[in-house]
Image: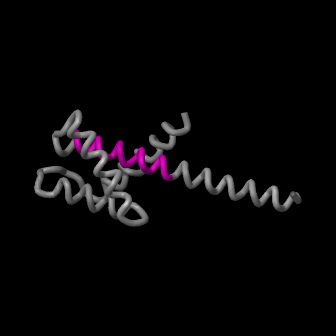
């Protein structure tokens, strides 16, 4: 194999690894988000909180990006007295993404 082919194969491997890490970090973030929303706004704990967290993870498979998660969570807290704006939710998602990335790096 030539040097160019070696570099190309290395770049493809890095791209695949980065994509896998992003997928795992996003799923972890969504689980953490679901647990936070469950406990903070919906009064759920234990198995109920875990179940809701799984629903949040699954909601992110609807479409590319985070809009599906945001819509799902906001719809889930609608009708409650939860003080959760889209801005606050997205800020929390950024915070939890950093935590998720840290967790999968360990």
**Against 101, is 68 above or below?**
below
Residue at the spot 16% in from the left edge and 40% down from the top edge: 43
Question: Farthest residue in the front direction?
Answer: 1
Say whether residue 75 is left or right of residue 29: left
Q: Identify the magenta region.
A: 23-39
Say whether residue 54 is left or right of residue 97: left
Where does the C terminus fall, quadrant-wise?
top right
Q: Nearer the viewer, residue 98 or 63?
A: 63
Question: Farthest residue in the bottom direction?
Answer: 63
Residue at the spot 88% in from the left edge and 59% down from the top edge: 2
Say whether residue 96 is left or right of residue 73: right
Q: x, y (%) of residue 31?
A: 35, 44
Q: x, y (%) of residue 79?
A: 11, 56
Q: Nearer the viewer, residue 48 or 100?
A: 48
Residue at the spot 26% in from the left edge and 59% down from the top edge: 72
Residue 37 lies in the magenta-colored region: yes
Q: Nearer the viewer, residue 101 or 52?
A: 52
């Amino acid at each position: 194999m030539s040097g160019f082919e070696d570099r190309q194969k290395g770049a493809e491997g890095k791209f695949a690894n980065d994509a896998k890490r992003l997928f795992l970090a996003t799923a972890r973030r969504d689980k953490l988000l679901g647990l936070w929303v469950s406990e903070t706004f919906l009064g759920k704990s234990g198995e109920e909180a875990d179940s809701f967290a799984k629903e949040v993870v699954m909601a992110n498979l609807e479409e590319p990006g985070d809009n599906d998660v945001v819509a799902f969570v906001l719809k889930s807290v609608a009708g409650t007295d939860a003080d959760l704006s889209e801005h606050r939710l997205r800020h929390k998602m950024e915070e939890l993404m950093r935590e998720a990335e840290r967790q999968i790096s360990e």
